[in-house]
Amino acid sequence: MSVRYLSCGDTAFSVEFGNEISPDINGRVMALHAAIGQAGIAGIVETVPSMRALMVCYDPTATTRADLQPAIDALIARGLPTGQAARQVTIPCCYDDPDFAPDLDEVAGRTGKSREEVIAAHLASRFKVYVLGFMPGLAYIAGLDPSLALPRRSQPRVRVPRSSVAIAMDMTTIYPFESPGGWHLIGRTPLWMFDQRREQPVFLAPGDSLAFQRIDRKVYDRIAREVEAGSFAWDRLVEAA
């Protein structure tokens, strides 16, 4: 397995597994992330996975890159299983309200599908969380059905509502906050992807397998009230690895 080490300042370096986005490469990144955590290598502060590389942050008073790189090489040489068990997460999503899915008709027209066929393809997609970025809690989720692949909108929106479900390229995402955005909005979940009241404020994590579950507006409103009140049972959406 060919890897490349790149410096990231004087307290971190990146272990790069390739130059493309693929399940195999991301699987290796996540496997090394897990292996380093299990090995308990002295001096490592944290590891941060990305699409195709793992950043290793370390305490320069406790270790050096010269000491850490051979230890990481040894972990890689032992083999990095890419089929590790992952959390199975279900995300309820309402596609039916026009305010929630303002781009659904356009996506249907550009992909040659009906609205229902777009929804069905999104629900059938085999999604995996690759990385978190841009905003706290925003997950880049790959695995969108190829028939729905579209470039980003030519004219981004100034405001995208929190919890909007959107697609672009071969990915979907869920906006954790109201923000600008250029992806196609096809639904909305009543869940908050970031909630500082929770013990773990960020709901999704790299490596999670993810599926969307269709709900109607009545169910959406009920779950939204529970989330707002802090009484929603988040555990029921997650099947542990």
Image: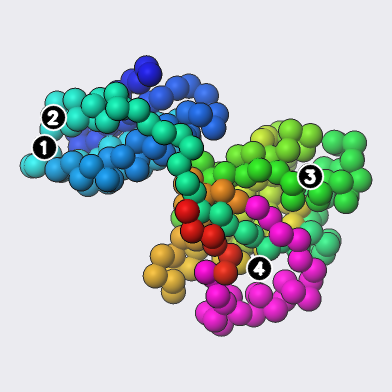
Callout 4–callout 1 Cβ contact below 8 Å: no
Q: Mark 1 falls on what kind of element?
A: loop
Amino acid beneath label 2: Asp
- Residue 190 appears at what percent x and percent y? 66, 68
Tell us which disc is closer to us: 4 or 2. 2
Residue 150 in sight: no
Amino acid identity at mark 1: Thr
Q: In screen coordinates, is 165 left or right of 202?
A: right
Residue 223 belongs to magenta span: yes
Which residue type carries mark 4?
Answer: Pro
Specify which label sits upstream in the sequence, 2 or 3. 2
User: Alpha carbon of mark 1 to alpha carbon of mark 2: how far?
Assistant: 7 Å
The part of the chain drawn in magenta is 211-235
Label 4 or label 2, whichever comes before in sequence order: 2
Residue in front for this viewpoint, 11 or 88:
88
Q: State the quadrant of the N terminus.
A: top left
Residue drawn where x is 79% and y is 44% of the image: 121
Q: Residue at x 35, y 36 (%)?
A: 32
Q: Main secondary structure of the magenta part?
A: helix
Q: Position of residue 18 (x, y in %)?
A: 45, 22
Q: Position of residue 87 (x, y in %)?
A: 51, 53
Q: CA distance from mark 1 to mark 3?
A: 49 Å
Q: Residues within 10 Å of mark 2 (few under 14, many from 20)?
A: few
Q: CA distance from mark 2 to mark 3?
A: 48 Å
Q: Residues within 10 Å of mark 1 (few under 14, many from 20)?
A: some
- The residue indicated by pointer 1 is 63
Q: Are marks 4 and 2 in contact (CB under 8 Å)?
A: no
Q: Quadrant of residue 146?
A: top right
Labels 1 and 2 touching (C-beta < 8 A): yes
Q: Residue at x 55, y 75 (%)?
A: 233
Residue 40, placed above or below residue 18: below
